[in-house]
Each structure stands twice: as C-alpha cells, then as structure tokens.
Amino acid sequence: MDDLKYWIGFNRVSGIGPIRFQRLFSHFGGDLRGAWHAPADELAALGLEQRALNNLLQQRQQLDLDAEMAALAAHGVTAVTLNDEAYPRLLRDIPSAPFVLYMRGEWLAQDEWAVAIVGTRRVSNYGRRVTEMVAHELADAGLTIVSGLALGIDRIAHEAAMAAGGRTIAVLANGVETAFPVRNRRLGERIVDEKRGLLISDYPLGTAPEAANFPPRNRIISGLALATLVVEAGEKSGALITARNAVEQGRDVFAVPGNISNASSKGTNRLIQQGAIPLLSAQDLLDALDIQMAEPKQAVRELVKTSATESLVLGMLSGEPRHIDEVGRDCGLPTATVSSTLSLLELKGLVSQSGSMMYVRL
C-alpha cells in the first residue's frame, strides 16, 4: 500500500484517534498524503482541536515516514490498516476500531475463531487450575486464545494454549517490538519464534507500557474474540474493563464462579450477578459458540484432529506456495515425514498442492 506510511504517521500523532482519523479520511476522500500535507487552516476547519493540530504540524515536520517504514521491517513488524483485507474481521466491527494494528507473527484465518481469557495477576491455585484446563481444552478444540501477556491468568492462558498445540495472541499496551512485562518477554518471543501466534498492538513502535495505555488496550483483547472469559478478578481488576468492553461490543462474557470470601473472585462473582454466563467447564463456552459459529465451527474442529507433527508442518505454510524441502528444513523433519504429513493434511482439506512438490495452506 503506497499510502501506508501516512497511516503510520497519523497513528504517531497524539490526539488523533479513530474518530478524528475517520473524519480526516472522509474529508480527504481517502487521500492520506493530501491530509498529511494539508494547510493548517483546512485542518482546523475540520474541527481538529488545537492540541491535536499542533501535534500534527509538529510531527509532520519532525517525522521521517520512510524511516518509520524501515523500522517496521527491521523489527519484523507488519502494519495492517482498517482498509486492508487482512485486518481482523471481528475487531473491525467494534466501535472506534484502531485504524492501524502492528503485528509480529502471522495472522491466520483460523484466528478469527478466538476466545479471550483474562483475569488477575495474583492468581490462586484454583484460578491456575481452571485457566490451564479451560485454555487447553479450547485450544485443543481449534480456538485461538487471546490475552494480554500479563503475569497471572494471562500468562497461564497463553502457555496452556501453546501446550495444547494451539495458537495464542498477546495484545500489548506498548510497542509490539518488545514484549512486556520483562518477566514474560521470553514467552512473547516464543509465541512469535515458534510460530504459535502473534503479538499485536495499536501503539507505535517505541511506545512505553504506560498505565494509561492498558484500559484502551483491553478493548482490542475483547474485540478480537467471539467471547471473553474472566477466570478470577478482584473488584477493581482491569479484567473487568475487558468484560465491559465485550458487552459494549455485543460479545458474550463468561465468568468462573469462585469462593465468595476470596478477594480474587469478588469481581467474577459480581459479573455473574450482573448477567455474565457462569462457566463450569470449557464445554459450556463451546456449546454457546456452536450456536453462533454454525458450519464454520466444523472447520475449526477439524484442527483438533491434527497431530503435533501435522500442526508443526501446517504452521510452516501460508497462502504462498512453499516447496516441500523448504518446509522440511524449517521444521527440522525428514522429507519423507513431511511428505506423508502433507498428504494427510491435504485429505483433511487444510492444504493443497499447487505444483510439483509445492503446497499452500487453505
């Protein structure tokens, strides 16, 4: 996209969020280059408040947009805009959807079938067991697990999804080039390096994980998911913000009942009191999603039938044809093993041969 750098530029301007950006985009008929270089009086006439206008004028003088694009490439980051087909479908539907997303790792079509799992950082043994069990079973059923890479419930959910051979998405409140918090940095890198999912943020590269960034980030966690599950949460937990966002986005909210004397369950018990769906097993959530997902759910469930080797080989493929030798080299398996595995995946309708020894993911 020729104008991608202008999307990136506007996303750098403090005071220009999704609503003001859409106003600019509409006024200039999608000509972001024209919007970026527009005279100050024309921008002011659009109702751009003085602070945002000053920030824009300053940024377009100081910002090297080509250097911004080079930095994305250097960090292995893909920028996806609201105009791109690759933009997550569910997230596009939420109010004030981010107009730019930064991704490390590959977004797959199956990631549209996702569930968010969130909760307290001070997790109890009960919360740990429930998170491990539910996240593992949902991932085993082919659902991608979305969370925020925080300590506690988030980390456990990410790890359980990976242990099940599934995929997981970590939504960050900082620049996507650096996983945060530091204690979970290695986990974030594993998600990307092992091709088990991706890191996502709507904050530009270099953005620090400031406290004010986390509440807006939570709307992306719920926005990427068909439903949000809160496992454990105190009465002031940020997970309750995610649950509220999910309700505003028209998504189901599930909560795990807990001991009424446990501070970490006060938030979840209150959610149930207010109408959240009590979750007693992963099957409760799967049953609810069956109603919404209908036939597409069958395609997701086929992923359950893939072995560890099949999942590994499948993860090496995309919509671009790859030679069987390349796949074998990248996943460290003998060519004969890769060949037989691809044949099984083709029978399951997950891959297709696109030429002599060339395969694509469906």
Image (cartoon, rainbow, N blue to C red):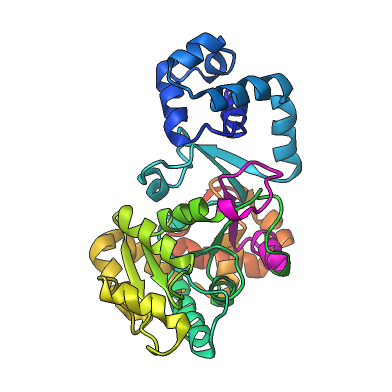
Residue at (73, 65) in percent of width and height: 182
Taking the view exactly as shown, the residue that stands out farthest to the front is: 50
Residue 226 seen from this side: no
Q: Is residue 305 above or below residue 79?
A: below
Q: Along the line of sight, which residue is nearer the eye, 266 or 90?
A: 266
Q: Is residue 13 above or below residue 78?
A: above
The answer to whether residue 258 is magenta is: no
The part of the image, by quadrant, that contains residue 332 is bottom right
Q: Position of residue 119 (x, y in %)?
A: 49, 72
Q: Along the line of sight, which residue is nearer the eye, 201 or 286?
A: 201
Quarter of the rendering occupied by the N terminus:
top right
Q: Position of residue 248 (x, y in %)?
A: 32, 54
Left or right of 181? Residue 136 is left
Q: Along the line of sight, which residue is nearer the eye, 89 or 126?
A: 126
The answer to whether residue 207 is magenta is: yes
Q: How many marks?
A: 0
Q: Position of residue 362 (x, y in %)?
A: 46, 52
> Which stretch did the figure color magenta?
184-213
Q: Is residue 139 above or below residue 148?
A: below
Residue at (70, 39) in percent of width and height: 72
Residue at (49, 89) in percent of width and height: 126
Q: Is residue 300 above or below residue 83?
A: below
Residue 243 seen from this side: yes
Q: Position of residue 23 (x, y in %)?
A: 41, 24
Residue at (42, 33) in percent of width and height: 19
